[in-house]
C-alpha cells in the first residue's frame, strides 16, 4: 500500500473524525439535568422511567434503602443517575415489588446507572400498601431516624405518629 506524501493537518483530521463519529452515534449531545426526588418519583409513577432488560438484578435490601434516605435527609450527595432518553413501548414497569402501568412514549428515561437507588425510593415512597413491602420504613420522630415499622398491633395510638 502506497502512503501519501502530503502533510496532514492534525486539527482538520480530528475535527473531521469527531464530526463523523458524533453524527453517526448521537442524535444530540448528552446533557446534565437536575431532578428533585419528588420530580423523579412523579416520572416513575407516570411510567416515564424504565428499567432496561440488560440491568442486573436488585441487590439492595432495606438497610441500603434506609442509608439512602438518611443521606437524602441529611443533604449528603447520593451520586448521579445516568438516564438514556429514548422511545418506549406501552407495558408495565417493575420497581422491585412495585408494578406500574407505563404508556407508550417517545421520551422515556431508561436507567443506565442508578437502578438500586430509584427502585428503593419508589418502593418506599410510592408503595400502595407500604406495610406489605420488604422495604417499608417509617420515620422515628423522636430519634430522627428511619426504622422498620412496628407490627400494626404494636403501634402507639398517638395520631401524630
Image (spheres, rainbow, N blue to C red):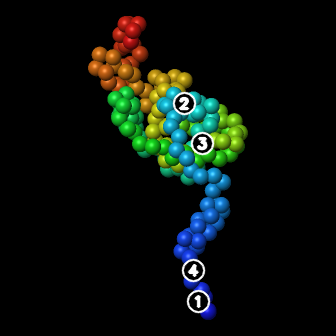
- Residue beneath disc 2: 39
Q: Work out how far the residue at label 2 is from the one at label 3, CA to CA, in angstroms.
A: 13 Å
Point out which mark residue 5 bears: 1
Whichever of callouts 4 and 2 sits on the residue coming sooner in the sequence is 4
Q: How many marks?
A: 4
Q: Work out how far the residue at label 1 is from the one at label 2, CA to CA, in angstroms.
A: 59 Å
Compared with 38, 58 (above or below) is below
SS at mark 4 in the image: loop
SS at mark 2 in the image: helix
Residue 51, by quadrant, is top right
Q: Work out how far the residue at label 3 is from the one at label 4, CA to CA, in angstroms.
A: 42 Å
Q: Is residue 54 left or right of residue 124?
A: right
Q: Is residue 152 left or right of residue 5?
A: left
Whichever of callouts 3 and 4 sits on the residue coming sooner in the sequence is 4
Horizontal and vertical percent position of residue 10: 54, 74
Horizontal and vertical percent position of residue 67: 35, 34
- Residue beneath disc 4: 8
Of 90 and 87, which appears nearest the observer? 87
Whichever of callouts 2 and 3 sits on the residue coming sooner in the sequence is 2
Of 35 and 40, which appears nearest the observer? 35
Point out which mark residue 159 bears: none
Whichever of callouts 3 and 1 sits on the residue coming sooner in the sequence is 1
Point out which mark residue 109 bears: 3
SS at mark 3 in the image: strand
Of 38 and 45, which appears nearest the observer? 38
Q: Are marks 1 and 2 in contact (CB under 8 Å)?
A: no
Amino acid at each position: 500500500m502506497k502512503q501519501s506524501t502530503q502533510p496532514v493537518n492534525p486539527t482538520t483530521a480530528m475535527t473531521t473524525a469527531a464530526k463523523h463519529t458524533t453524527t453517526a452515534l448521537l442524535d444530540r449531545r448528552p446533557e446534565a439535568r437536575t431532578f428533585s426526588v419528588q420530580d423523579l418519583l412523579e416520572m416513575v409513577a407516570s411510567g416515564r422511567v424504565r428499567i432496561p432488560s440488560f440491568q442486573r438484578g436488585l441487590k439492595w435490601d432495606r438497610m441500603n434503602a434506609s442509608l439512602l434516605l438518611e443521606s437524602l435527609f441529611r443533604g449528603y450527595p447520593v451520586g448521579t443517575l445516568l438516564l438514556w432518553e429514548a422511545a418506549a413501548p406501552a407495558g408495565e414497569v417493575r420497581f422491585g415489588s412495585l408494578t406500574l402501568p407505563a404508556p407508550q412514549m417517545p421520551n422515556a428515561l431508561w436507567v443506565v446507572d442508578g437502578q438500586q437507588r430509584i427502585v428503593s425510593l419508589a418502593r418506599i415512597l410510592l408503595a400502595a400498601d407500604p406495610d406489605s413491602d420488604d422495604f417499608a420504613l417509617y420515620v422515628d420522630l423522636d430519634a430522627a431516624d428511619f426504622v422498620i415499622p412496628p407490627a400494626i398491633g404494636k403501634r402507639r395510638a398517638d395520631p401524630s405518629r
